[in-house]
């Protein structure tokens, strides 16, 4: 039988059966518009309220602080543009990092074209943003700091609590893109001390096309999506009721027994990392050795191209990625790997295997049984491999 091993859980995850079940009523009989006042719409309105309670409970927030969006990208855009525009009278300087997702980096670049100035903090060779570097970058006119909680390519988990406390000391708003973190590691907005936090359902067993932005009570932020009075006048657009029901169910399931799941997935990660290091020469593990998402494995295999590796893995039924899903297809090396200080030729040969809840030890064994030979074959074909 043909093997299929899905190891691209950082790109997206399969929708859990219970999540689909939670969504179906709102795609069938309960099709009402949550804003309508007749009885038929009550179920839809209740589903949105329940989804909001579930997301708030998972994050340690109040339901009034949760706002639904169409995706993680929209949550990042809203947080950054909304905070920048609402606070520009105080200053027009924003701080972020060089390894953010493009949803943050391209939003920051857009604001630069519109009169804001942005500092892109470097990271160390393991991908960590230094709290001292953040302190040094803060200016009189800094109004917003946006640092991701966990990196989507290399899995490095940033010291958000420490970074956010520096921002709080200086009364600067702090946003974190927690799209990779939520459902993988514990995320509590009060404990972290953040003002704004983005998440996306499809990264933890929910459907695509729905996300949320946590906005701490009292945070000054402009509306991003102008329209109707939905989301308490702050985000127009008829709610994605089925998506919100799915998001609520998915975040509830993903955050249950999170420590147990984290341990199990970390054990699979460590087995995969150890197996690769033992069997493949010139393999470099990217990202932090321990401050790392439980399911993230990212290697550079010197002398080969990431794309060629992906095609051969695909032929063996293994779905993985090189760089991030959004940039594969372009031949530019990953901005994240370049920020770690890797030279272009090495950054091209990267492989990300991201493990999810559904993966098994047998699947890891299977990857370890085919990957070393694939690397060997590709190197034998490479004109630059010294042998
Ligand atoms: C996937 C991802 C996003 C974008 O989320 P979408 O819901 O796909 O728009 C943003 N940031 C990070 C870190 C991600 O991994």
Image (cartoon, rainbow, N blue to C red):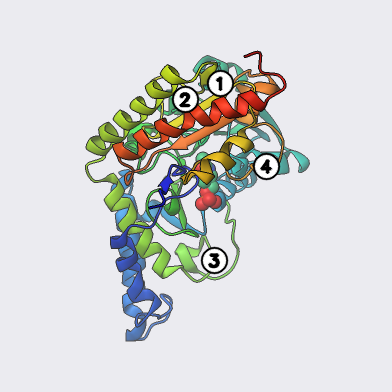
Disc 4 from disc 1: Cα separation = 20 Å
Q: Label 3: which residue? A: 236
Disc 4 from disc 2: Cα separation = 22 Å
Disc 3 from disc 2: Cα separation = 32 Å
Q: Mark 2: few, some, or many residues within 10 Å (few <14, many ≥20)?
A: many
Q: Label 4: which residue? A: 106
Q: Earlier in the sequence, mark 4 or mark 1?
A: 4
Name the image quarter holding the C terminus: top right
Q: Secondary structure at mark 4?
A: helix
Q: Earlier in the sequence, mark 4 or mark 2?
A: 4
Q: Are marks 3 and 4 in contact (CB under 8 Å)?
A: no
Label placed on residue 163: 2
Please tell me which residue lies in front, 122 or 207.
207
Q: Label 1: which residue? A: 134
Q: Are marks 3 and 2 in contact (CB under 8 Å)?
A: no
- Residue 166, percent from left and from top: 47, 23
Q: Secondary structure at mark 2?
A: helix
Disc 1 from disc 3: Cα separation = 35 Å
Please tell me which residue lies in front, 378 or 139.
378
Q: Earlier in the sequence, mark 3 or mark 4?
A: 4
Q: Earlier in the sequence, mark 1 or mark 3?
A: 1
């Amino acid at each position: 039988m043909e093997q299929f091993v899905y190891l691209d859980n950082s790109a997206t995850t399969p929708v859990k059966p219970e999540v689909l079940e939670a969504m179906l009523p709102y795609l069938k009989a309960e099709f009402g518009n949550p804003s309508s006042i007749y009885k038929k719409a009550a179920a839809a309105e209740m589903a949105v309220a329940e989804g909001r309670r579930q997301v708030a409970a998972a994050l340690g927030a109040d339901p009034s602080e949760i706002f639904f969006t169409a995706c993680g990208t929209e949550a990042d855009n809203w947080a950054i543009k909304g905070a920048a525009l609402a606070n520009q009278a105080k200053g027009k300087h924003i701080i972020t990092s060089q390894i953010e997702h493009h949803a943050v980096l391209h939003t920051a670049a857009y604001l630069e074209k519109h009169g804001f100035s942005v500092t892109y903090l470097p990271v160390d060779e393991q991908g960590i943003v230094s709290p001292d570097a953040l302190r040094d970058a803060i200016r009189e006119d800094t109004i917003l700091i946006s640092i991701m909680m966990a990196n989507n390519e290399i899995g490095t988990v940033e010291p958000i609590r420490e970074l956010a406390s520096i921002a709080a000391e200086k009364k600067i708003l702090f946003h974190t893109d927690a799209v990779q973190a939520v459902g993988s590691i514990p995320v509590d907005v009060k404990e972290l001390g953040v003002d704004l936090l983005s998440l996306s359902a499809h990264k933890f067993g929910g459907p695509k096309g729905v996300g949320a932005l946590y906005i701490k009570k009292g945070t000054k932020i402009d509306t991003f999506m102008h329209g109707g009075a939905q989301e308490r006048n702050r985000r127009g657009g008829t709610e994605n009721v089925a998506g919100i029901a799915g998001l609520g169910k998915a975040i509830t399931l993903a955050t249950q027994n999170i420590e147990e799941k984290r341990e199990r997935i970390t054990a699979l990660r460590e087995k995969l990392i150890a197996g690769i290091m033992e069997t493949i020469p010139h393999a470099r593990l990217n990202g932090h050795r321990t401050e790392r998402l439980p399911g993230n494995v990212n290697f550079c295999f010197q002398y080969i191209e990431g794309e060629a590796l992906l095609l051969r893995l695909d032929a063996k039924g293994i779905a993985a990625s090189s760089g991030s899903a959004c940039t594969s297809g372009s031949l530019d090396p990953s901005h994240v790997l370049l920020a770690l200080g890797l030279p272009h030729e090495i950054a091209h040969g990267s492989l990300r295997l991201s493990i999810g809840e559904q993966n098994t030890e047998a699947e890891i064994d299977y990857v370890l049984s085919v990957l070393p030979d694939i690397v060997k074959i590709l190197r034998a074909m490479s004109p630059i491999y010294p042998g």
